[in-house]
Image (cartoon, rainbow, N blue to C red):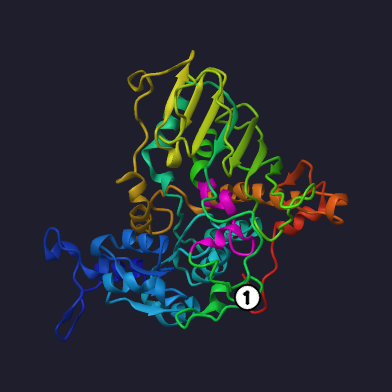
């Protein structure tokens, strides 16, 4: 029974059976939370980020964690101690079959390549869903996930927690106050990857640990022999499973400019990537893996919020945007260590921030503008800021579809993720080649024009293979 049904049941009927009663909160006294007021949650992915997503949503017992699912028993050792009453499973499908009637909402905190299949299965069963960033592994998945959420009328949230932070709201207020004028250029960078990337696929063929269901970990990805070099974190640099630096940090760093400017679908995309030379004149060619570094440029049309076309440039792998005129050369931009940063250059000034929209600043006439001289806060804040991202979703689930605002619902997160993943489409197209060695012809090194409505590159057909991947037999959306 869903929370909505339980609350209606309590409201409209008074039922007693033997010594068991379901009683509303106000009868039990101030500060007491009836079991019927709690959200029943299943967490899929119990280690790493999955652990924090589940525990933040659990909120020290304010909600119920009914079940935890992970293909690797080693990853749930910690959470089993913290949640001894939860049921534990390896296969999310078996868990949903058995626990479906007891679960209202599902958290998906698995590697990128399984986000879509799990989220779709949960939404088909009318479960509210929270999915870690990026929402999906490829553009097509992001589109259909958002459509399914709308169709099933479930409460959704992507796990880019900075979208619940105060920083992005502060930046919106400053921009709406006209402080920096019309923005024409956005520069964004990250120090990722901080895992092995741009290297040959490591040797495989190891014995699968007894604690791991390797076939389930692969999910819809093509079959490969077990490789301990991938788990639990280093899968991010391989296209079969991860989405590289853009997938890891793009949804955190690009959220502020998207929210501030109201941009959505890219018009076109182009890129360049770093090369590694182990032999003279011939760069290493590793199409199955993300490059060591990249620079991606996307163009966006003017919007109602920002009546100016925007050029957005992304840098990763140690590359970073040039220090703009108008900001003192001694000032650090973005995070305090400069590892991640965002710059919005407007007709009247410059606005910057770091990860999650933190450390927002405005510069005009070559100087930072004191915060007290900038527009004051007007927008409502999320309780707890970025730390309240999970609980915001939980409360919205309990209220019901369309009753409460969330910071990154799939109606926003879907198109946003599509735009983030456009960069990866360009990177993979850049690596396409005909021939080998010094005479190789890299056929995809061009600006790619994007038809967002039909999800197609219109001027280079070979790039469209990266819009939607092929699933392994037995796996579907």
Name which residue lies at 40% across and 48% down. Answer: 405
Q: Which residue is the extreme one toward the left?
A: 29
Q: Which residue is the extreme one toward the top?
A: 365
Residue at mark 1: 475
Name which residue lies at 45% across and 28% down. Answer: 332
* Residue 154 appears left or right of 267: left
* Residue 120 appears left or right of 98: right
Q: Residues within 10 Å of mark 1 (few under 14, many from 20)?
A: few
Residue 1 appears in the picture as rendered: no
Q: Is residue 326 above or below residue 134?
A: above
> Residue 199, how many percent across, how many down?
64, 57
* Residue 330 appears left or right of 8: right
Q: Is residue 363 magenta?
A: no
For residue 117, which quarter of the picture? bottom right
Name which residue lies at 31% across and 74% down. Answer: 80
> Residue 366, how many percent across, how many down?
48, 15
As helix, strand or loop, the secondary structure at mark 1 comes to: loop
Name which residue lies at 23% across and 70% down. Answer: 35
* Residue 84 appears left or right of 321: left
Identify the image quadrant of the C terminus.
bottom right
**Nearer-the-camera pick, 445 or 194:** 194
> Residue 395, how many percent across, how many down?
33, 56
Chain part drawn in magenta: 233-251
**Nearer-the-camera pick, 246 or 477:** 246
Identify the image quadrant of the N terminus.
bottom left
């Amino acid at each position: 029974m869903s929370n909505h049904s339980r609350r209606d049941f309590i409201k409209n009927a008074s039922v007693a059976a033997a010594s068991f009663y379901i009683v509303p909160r106000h009868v039990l006294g101030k500060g007491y939370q009836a079991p019927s007021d709690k959200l029943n949650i299943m967490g899929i992915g119990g280690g790493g980020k999955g652990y924090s997503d589940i525990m933040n949503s659990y909120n020290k017992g304010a909600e119920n964690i009914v079940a935890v699912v992970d293909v690797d028993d080693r990853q749930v050792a910690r959470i089993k101690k913290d949640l001894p009453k939860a049921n534990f499973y390896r296969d999310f499908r078996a868990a949903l079959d058995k626990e479906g009637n007891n679960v209202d909402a599902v958290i998906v905190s698995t590697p990128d390549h399984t986000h879509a299949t799990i989220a779709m299965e949960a939404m088909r069963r009318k479960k509210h869903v929270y999915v870690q960033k990026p929402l999906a592994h490829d553009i097509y998945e992001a589109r259909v996930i958002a459509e399914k959420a709308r169709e099933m009328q479930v409460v959704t949230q992507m796990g880019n927690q900075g979208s619940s932070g105060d920083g992005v709201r502060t930046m919106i207020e400053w921009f709406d106050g006209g402080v920096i004028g019309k923005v024409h250029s956005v520069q964004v960078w990250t120090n990722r990857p901080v895992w092995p990337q741009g290297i040959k696929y490591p040797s495989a063929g190891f014995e699968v640990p007894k604690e791991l269901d390797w076939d389930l970990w692969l999910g819809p990805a093509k079959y490969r022999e077990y490789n301990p070099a991938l788990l639990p974190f280093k899968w991010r640099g391989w296209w079969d499973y991860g989405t590289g630096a853009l997938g890891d940090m793009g949804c955190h760093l690009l959220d502020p400019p998207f929210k501030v400017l109201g941009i959505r679908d890219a018009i076109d995309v182009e890129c360049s990537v770093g090369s590694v030379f182990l032999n003279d004149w011939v760069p290493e060619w590793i199409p199955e893996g993300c490059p060591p570094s990249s620079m991606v440029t996307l163009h966006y049309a003017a919007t109602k919020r920002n009546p100016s076309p925007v050029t957005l440039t992304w840098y990763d792998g140690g590359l970073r945007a040039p220090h703009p005129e108008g900001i003192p050369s001694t000032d650090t931009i973005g995070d305090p260590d400069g590892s991640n940063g965002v710059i919005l250059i407007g007709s009247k000034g410059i606005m910057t921030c770091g990860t999650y929209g933190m450390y927002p600043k405005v510069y005009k006439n070559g100087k930072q503008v004191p915060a007290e001289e900038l527009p004051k806060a007007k927008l409502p804040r999320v309780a707890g800021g970025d730390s309240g991202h999970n609980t915001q979703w939980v409360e919205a689930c309990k209220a019901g579809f369309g009753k409460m605002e969330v910071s990154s619902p799939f109606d926003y997160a879907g198109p946003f993720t599509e735009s983030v993943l456009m960069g990866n489409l360009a990177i993979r197209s850049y690596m396409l080649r005909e021939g080998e060695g010094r005479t190789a012809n890299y056929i995809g090194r061009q600006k790619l024009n994007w038809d967002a409505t039909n999800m197609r590159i219109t001027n280079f057909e070979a790039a469209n293979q990266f819009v939607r991947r092929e699933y392994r037999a037995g796996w579907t959306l």
